[in-house]
Amino acid sequence: MANIERLPSGSYRVTVQLAGQRRRGTAATKADAGQLRARLLAELQAASPRTRRLPSGARSVPVAELLDRQIADPGYSPTTHTDLQRVRDRLPAEFRATPVVDVTVADLDRLYDNLAQPAGRRTESGERTT
């Protein structure tokens, strides 16, 4: 669970909870609060043991391979197919190479924050430039 609420002072309180543990913090802006949420979730995930397990003999595919399989589906209209390819191409290379089972909530929060930035404000690794 992750929650961002605006306080009467105008700042934002961020609360994240994972596996029975909770972290809180405050930020001056909503954008800073989103970054704080991702950082707090990453801290909680790093502190908790990995509970996801693949069935015996299964392998985790990279995000890029899963997306390529989905995009190859002939059921999409040409416009949707083009849009899916455009979104895939905007994903940072590091994220595309991540095994699907290793993608965390914090990874997705960082990805969403990254994709919300104009293309010229991102680096190849997906980090925003200032």
Image (spheres, rainbow, N blue to C red):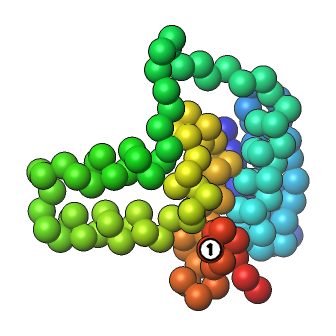
Q: Quadrant of residue 17?
A: top right
Outermost residue, top direction?
A: 56
- Determine whether 100 is above or below 36 in the image: above
Tell me the residue that label 1 is attached to.
124
Residue 110 visible in the shown view: yes
Q: Give coordinates of residue 85: x percent, y percent.
A: 32, 66
Of residue 19 and residue 114, the one placed in the foreground of this image is 114
* Residue that appears at 24% across and 70% down: 82
Residue 8 visible in the shown view: no
* Residue that appears at 33% across and 52% down: 68
Q: Give coordinates of residue 74: x percent, y percent.
A: 12, 52
Please give left or right for residue 52 compared with residue 78 in the image.
Answer: right
Please give left or right for residue 14 compared with residue 87 in the image.
Answer: right
Please give left or right for residue 42 compared with residue 120 in the image.
Answer: right
* Residue that appears at 80% across and 58% down: 36
* Crowding near the residue tagged with mark 1, few <14, some 14–19, many ≥20 C-alpha atoms within 10 Å: few
On-image quarter of the C terminus? bottom right
User: Which residue type carries mark 1?
Assistant: Glu
SS category of the residue bearing label 1: loop
